[in-house]
Amino acid sequence: MISKFIYQCNDCGIQIPAGEIVYLCPGCSEKQQPGQPPLGVLKIVYDYKALSGIVFQELEDNRFLQLLPVQDMKSFPNLRVGHTPLYEIDQLNGHINDFELYLKDDSQNPTFSFKDRASALVSAFAKENGIDTIVAASTGNAGSSLAGICAAQGQKAVIFAPSTAPKAKLTQIMMYGATLVPVAGNYDSAFDLSIEATRRFGWYNRNTAFNPLTVEGKKTVSFELFSQLHENTPDFIFVPVGDGVIISGVYKGFEDLLLLGIIEKMPVIIAVQAAGSSNLVGNIGKSEFQVTPSHTIADSISVDIPRNFHMAADYLTKYHGQTVTVSDDEIIKASSMLAKNTGIFTEPAAAAAFAGFLDYKTRSMIPKGSTNVVLLTGSGLKDLSAVQTLFDIPQAVAPDIDSVGMFLKAAEV
């Protein structure tokens, strides 16, 4: 085991040496109550004093190895994970923006979702520590991500997923050769089963938040944004939120840079949740966590019990983040607008972040001249059924040009 970092409990602050595999703080996790977000989620902490004075370019030249819990970049899969494009969009619906708008398109990862960032790091760590089998619970994206990354690494993947997950995502999992365990229940049921399987069979668990490396993998997006914006910090970042791990990763990346003195301020990060699954933002500041059953078209962020609730809520509170919820109707309209204006087709969970941005824009909350980033976390091809209500595929035309002419006239082309 490597020792360039330590684990620190998000709740009690106890520090645990990185001498063995640890998932949750032993003391806090014993206080866990049924139906509540996990206690004792761990954060990975580096020796920031030892890295004092380092410049960003040096970190980037070493592919941020000093701020990752692995020893060698060769442990990562031979796939391009991360380094996804950042597109500047200067107009929407024909109107020139009076602000800067950037779209970070993580659907360009190998398995077409942001989750590859976490899977790649977990896989690399497993490789360095002689671990062969990795298990995860997923509504689809994390599972297909782990399956694909493990295929590239020659590792075994076991995925617990709700049987109702989008067929495209379940197909991905099986095409990569992973063992799919369909669960007659929701994501929370799949999550709990995967934990039990970890204990019984001794597998390494990739589960979001449960494994502290997932936050570390996802924080790399912050390093990339800082680089792609020419070492400038954006003013606002819109992040789709379910379990709270992606937004925690975004915060963690910028927090690392803040602790190293590379940046002087934290961007305003906006947590965007579907109105039909807002258990994270709806419970911030409450003395007791209350679960509202989730009903949303955005399956990737449909979560009853956010597994990284406490860390995400702490980050949003500490750094004065903001929250917004958007309806399924707003999500679908945002997905359509995004595709027609930019050529980027995203799944509903990713479109939610853009819907959040549009909500801010409609309410005149996007300052003139500000720099705004929207995280697009997954491809629309992951869930085609979600957008079927937007259109009907036309009936076939006869194979002659007159029929084509009549068709085009009717279509007002």
Image (spheres, grey):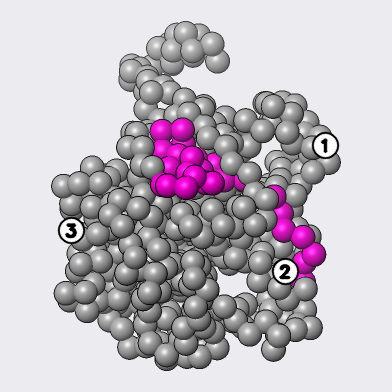
Residue 384's x, y, as percent? 36, 37
Q: Earlier in the sequence, mark 2 or mark 3?
A: 3
Q: Amino acid at mark 2?
A: Leu
Q: CA distance from mark 2 to mark 1?
A: 26 Å
Q: CA distance from mark 3 to mark 1?
A: 50 Å
Mark 2 to mark 3 CA distance (whole Å):
41 Å
Residue 399: in sight, yes or no? Answer: no
Q: Is residue 392 above or below residue 327?
A: above
Overall secondary structure of the magenta section: loop
Q: Is 381 left or right of 256, judged from the image as shown?
A: left
On screen, residue 294 versus residue 66, left or right, reads left
Residue 351 in the image: above or below residue 328: below
Q: Which quadrant, please, contains the N terminus?
A: bottom left
Question: Which comes sooner in the sequence, label 2 or label 1?
Answer: 2
Q: Position of residue 76 (x, y in %)?
A: 46, 78
Q: Which residue is mark 1?
A: 368
Question: Mark 3 touching mark 1, by CB under 8 A?
Answer: no
Q: Secondary structure at mark 1?
A: loop
Q: In the picture, which quadrant includes the C terminus? A: top right
Span shown in magenta: 262-289
Q: Name the residue: 54% across, 84% down.
A: 5
Q: Residue at x 30, y 76 (%)?
A: 204
Camera-side residue of 396 and 73: 73
Kindly identify which residue carries mark 3.
Answer: 181
Q: Residue at x 52, y 32 (%)?
A: 326
Most foreground residue, 351 or 209: 209
Q: Which residue is mark 2?
A: 258
Q: Residue furthest right?
A: 369
